[in-house]
Image (cartoon, helix red, strand yellow):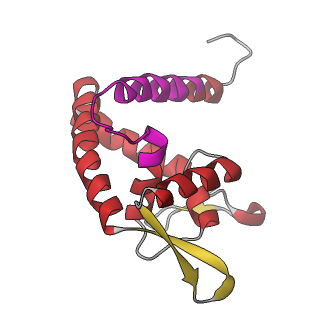
Amino acid sequence: MAANRHPANDAWEALLSAHAALMKQFAAEDIWGDLSMREYDVLYTLSKCPEPARIGELNRHVLLSQPALSRLVDRLAERGLLERKPDPADGRAIRLALTDSGRVLQRQVGLQHGSSVARAMAARLTPGELQQLETICLKLAREPALAGLPANDTNGTTHP
């Protein structure tokens, strides 16, 4: 590390490098069929939603711009993998949900992808390191404290 660099910058670069290397490995696998990884990401994200989601909610969980996500949603709907439903709370809005076909495809690809992820991660990290990585990533994924108030851990501990 250069003397004038903050350790956070080195950690950030290492995180991005690890993500890029793993994503290239996963993209090269013959598991995606006629789905792109981005399309799978949308199907996976919708599969975790307990009810149909607005596109803005979906956009917070995928790495796509709003226009790109809208086009991808259009393609997935045309293929019968997701459907648009009226939002009961707002007649102008729509909600997105997986169709039965979308749910089946997501599960098929997801089982293979989950196995690939487990193999790749377990080959490089010990069980203890995997737990540490999960804890650290969940901490980083938390929304920052609002208006300068301290953030709370899931166990209620307050941190500055």
Q: Was residue 123 drawn as part of the magenta stretch in this picture?
A: no
Q: Which residues are magenta?
A: 13-40
Image quarter of the C terminus = bottom right
Residue drawn 28% across the image and 24% down it: 124
Give how far across and how far down residue 102 sits, in percent.
35, 60
Give how far across and how far down residue 20 sits, in percent.
49, 25
- With 76 as the anchor, is 118 left or right in this view? left
Quarter of the image holding residue 56?
Answer: bottom right
- With 14 as the anchor, is 65 left or right in this view? right
Residue drawn 22% across the image and 47% down it: 111
Foreground: 3 or 85? 85
Give how far across and how far down residue 128 sits, in percent.
26, 37
**Count of numbered circles on the image:** 0
In the image, residue 45 sits, relative to residue 5, either above or below, namely below
Foreground: 74 or 153? 74
Dominant secondary structure, magenta: helix
In the image, residue 25 sits, relative to residue 107, either above or below, namely above
Residue drawn 56% across the image and 61% down it: 58
Q: Residue furthest top?
A: 2
- With 50 as the anchor, is 121 left or right in this view? left
Foreground: 21 or 13? 21
Q: Is residue 14 visible?
A: yes
